[in-house]
Amino acid sequence: MTTERIGPPLLAGERETLRAFLDFHRATLAMKCEGLTDEELRQRAVPSSQLTLLGLLRHLAEVERAWFRRVIDAQDVPLLWSDTGDYQQAYDPSGSTGAEAFAAWQREVEHSRRIERAAASLDVTGHQARWGEDVSLRLVMLHMMHEYARHNGHADLLREAVDGSVGV
């Protein structure tokens, strides 16, 4: 499988730009994981860290699910990998394969895209129960870009530790 990553438009409206940047970051994560075995996806960059590419895939599937399905769409769906609401459990890759994690992440990304496209505007709000506050779709999309950008930095280091690959 080869992931196509398309750069965001240079001239576009706010929503199209946000959507494109978020998809750019999603594609970056996919490219960092592409072509690796389960063992390689479980490899750590440093011994003291539990962070792995497989764990990042699982975590970002969980984050997509939480922000778009649970917050913006108000779906009563459980977390994927925790019965107790502990987002950190997603980082533990021992219970899944790369194919399972990637499929879960792709499903959640598709749900997120559908929810965003169906929203009347970026001003649509949902309730973030953990904060006890309402939030806009605009904030969610910006938060997701922040989440991916931060974790794609981790993914850069993890991939380099696996096989020396740098950049994308």
Image: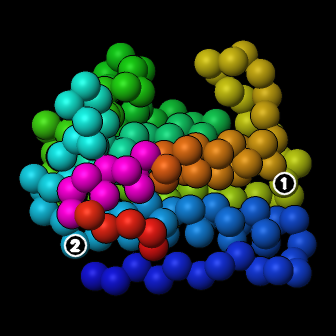
Question: Is any part of residue 24 visible from this angle?
Answer: yes
Q: In this rendered view, identify the residue nearer to me: 158 or 84.
A: 158
Q: Is residue 108 visible?
A: no
If the image is split into quadrants, where does the C terminus sit?
bottom left
Residue 128 falls within the magenta-colored stretch: no
Q: Report x, y in % for residue 32.
A: 36, 64
Q: Is residue 47 left or right of residue 133?
A: left
Point out the tag, 2 or 1, that comes first from the N-terminus.
Answer: 2
The quarter of the image holding the N terminus is: bottom left
- x, y percent for residue 151: 48, 46
Pick the residue in front: 81 or 25.
Answer: 25
In the picture shown, does residue 27 fall above or below 10? above
Q: Any mark on residue 107, and which? A: none
Q: Residue at x 43, y 61 (%)?
A: 29
Amino acid type indicated by mark 1:
Leu
Q: CA distance from mark 2 to mark 1?
A: 36 Å
Q: Is residue 58 left or right of residue 11?
A: left
**Percent of width and height locating residue 9:** 77, 80
Q: Residue tagged by mark 1?
A: 122
Q: Could you say which disc has been placed on residue 35 in the image?
A: 2
- Residue type highlighted by circle 2: Gly
Q: Main secondary structure of the magenta part?
A: helix
Helix, strand or loop at label 1? It is: loop
Residue numbers of the magenta segment: 154-163
